[in-house]
Image (spheres, grey):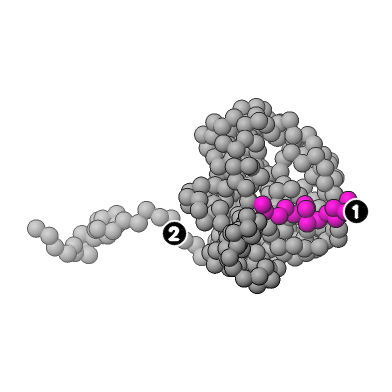
């Protein structure tokens, strides 16, 4: 028969009946309680903290050049943290990486960085790593989704409150300006990339194509199967008549970016903008990242190149149909001037 225990009975119990607290008591004065002020940027010797991120798979052959180039970076090394994710490698990428980092970070090395982190994570990716397959049309969807997932794991483990910038860098770069970080940083953009062949502005044909694709299809740019007629950043940067670069620091709005060099304000990542490992607006990885950033409103001050949506597509389709009709002599509308 149940009842309330008397004080004498309760004194003989190790703890009150019906009550059990398995947790350690919280000591409010404990030094393990951290206070983080994300409104104040962290500086080291006057320089904002930068996190350099590089995902790796079967990349052993590129690591010697990679480390040679990052040691030549002009940005203060004590304000740079390095982080790598090694996954699904069949070669000795992990061992080579560890050897390179040990040599780089030895105390006697004046070019060592503030810190270096190595993350291991296998995703079960068995796709071939041959050059032919990696660049084949069939590989693009699965490959880009896989790279996007690797980037996200790397980002969420390595990003710390003190980081102001995230610099994504491919492992197979063979040359770059030693001032690449500060060159990009001085533009003070949420996301910025240097001149390359993998970044582009959307075209009306690209919008029309995306409007007709299944939502789970990843549109692989640069392949004949998808004729988008997009405008590449490299084309915009060159004066074709004079065969030389135009203003090196001119900014242009973009709708898709490559992953060779990307400088991102860390708060953009903290706001949830990452690298889709699924089809986001028919793009994945870095191109999906750009689409996600634009959807969230970043970059609109520079000119939203996808503004207009379906109405813009339909308007351009109508103009294209009229152009073809004129060419065939079947145009029955008004004059060409309108």
* Residue 68 to residue 251: above or below: above
* Residue 85 to residue 324: above or below: above
* Left or right side of 164 for 14: left
* Left or right side of 336 for 270: left
Closer-to-camera residue (6/15): 15
Occupied quadrant, residue 172: top right
User: Are the two marked residues, 2 and 1, in contact with CB atoms closer than 8 angstroms?
Assistant: no
Q: CA distance from mark 2 to mark 1?
A: 73 Å
Q: Position of residue 59 (x, y in %)?
A: 69, 33
Query: For the residue labelled by badge 2, is the local secondary structure a helix, a strand or a loop?
Result: loop
* Left or right side of 233 for 34: left
Closer-to-camera residue (118/201): 201
Q: Residue at x 60, y 46 (%)?
A: 226
Q: Residue at x 26, y 55 (%)?
A: 13
Closer-to-camera residue (166/187): 187
Query: Crowdedness of circle 2 by 10 Å Cα count: few (<14), some, many (20+)?
Result: few
Q: Residue at x 59, y 59 (%)?
A: 330
**Mark 2 against mark 1, which lies toward the viewer?**
1
Query: For the residue labelled by badge 1, is the local secondary structure a helix, a strand or a loop?
Result: loop
* Residue 171 to residue 190: above or below: above
Q: Position of residue 32 (x, y in %)?
A: 56, 58
Residue labelled with disc 1 = 242
On residue 280, which mark appears? Answer: none
Picture quarter with the C terminus: bottom right
Is residue 233 part of the magenta span, yes or no?
A: yes
Occupied quadrant, residue 68: top right
On residue 25, which mark appears? Answer: 2
Q: Which residues are magenta?
A: 229-244
């Amino acid at each position: 028969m149940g009842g309330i225990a008397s004080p004498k009975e309760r004194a003989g119990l190790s703890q009150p009946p019906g009550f059990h607290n398995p947790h350690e008591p919280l000591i409010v004065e404990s030094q393990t309680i951290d206070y983080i002020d994300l409104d104040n940027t962290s500086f080291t010797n006057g320089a904002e903290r930068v996190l350099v991120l590089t995902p790796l798979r079967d990349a052993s052959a590129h690591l010697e050049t990679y480390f040679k180039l990052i040691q030549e970076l002009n940005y203060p090394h004590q304000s740079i943290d390095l982080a790598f994710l090694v996954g699904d490698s069949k070669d000795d990428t992990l061992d080579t990486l560890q050897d390179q980092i040990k040599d780089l970070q030895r105390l006697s090395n004046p070019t060592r960085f503030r810190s270096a982190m190595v993350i291991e994570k296998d995703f079960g990716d068995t796709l071939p790593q041959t050059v032919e397959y990696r660049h084949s049309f069939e590989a693009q969807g699965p490959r880009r989704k896989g790279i996007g997932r690797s980037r996200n794991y790397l980002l969420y483990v390595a990003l710390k409150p003190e980081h102001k910038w995230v610099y994504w860098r491919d492992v197979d770069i063979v040359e770059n300006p030693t001032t690449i970080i500060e060159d990009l940083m001085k533009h003070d953009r949420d996301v910025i990339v240097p001149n390359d062949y993998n970044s582009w502005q959307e075209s009306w044909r690209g919008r029309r194509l995306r409007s007709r694709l299944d939502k789970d299809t990843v549109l692989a740019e640069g392949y004949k199967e998808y004729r988008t007629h997009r405008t590449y950043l490299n084309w915009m940067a060159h004066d074709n008549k004079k065969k030389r670069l135009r203003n090196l620091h001119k900014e242009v709005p973009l709708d898709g970016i490559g992953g060779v060099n990307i400088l991102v304000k860390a708060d953009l990542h903290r706001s949830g903008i990452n690298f889709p490992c699924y089809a986001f607006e028919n793009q994945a990885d870095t191109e999906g990242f750009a689409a996600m950033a634009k959807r969230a409103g970043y970059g609109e001050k520079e000119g939203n190149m996808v503004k207009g949506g379906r109405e813009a597509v339909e308007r351009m389709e109508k103009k294209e149909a009229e152009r073809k009709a004129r060419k065939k002599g079947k145009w029955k509308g008004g004059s060409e001037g309108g």
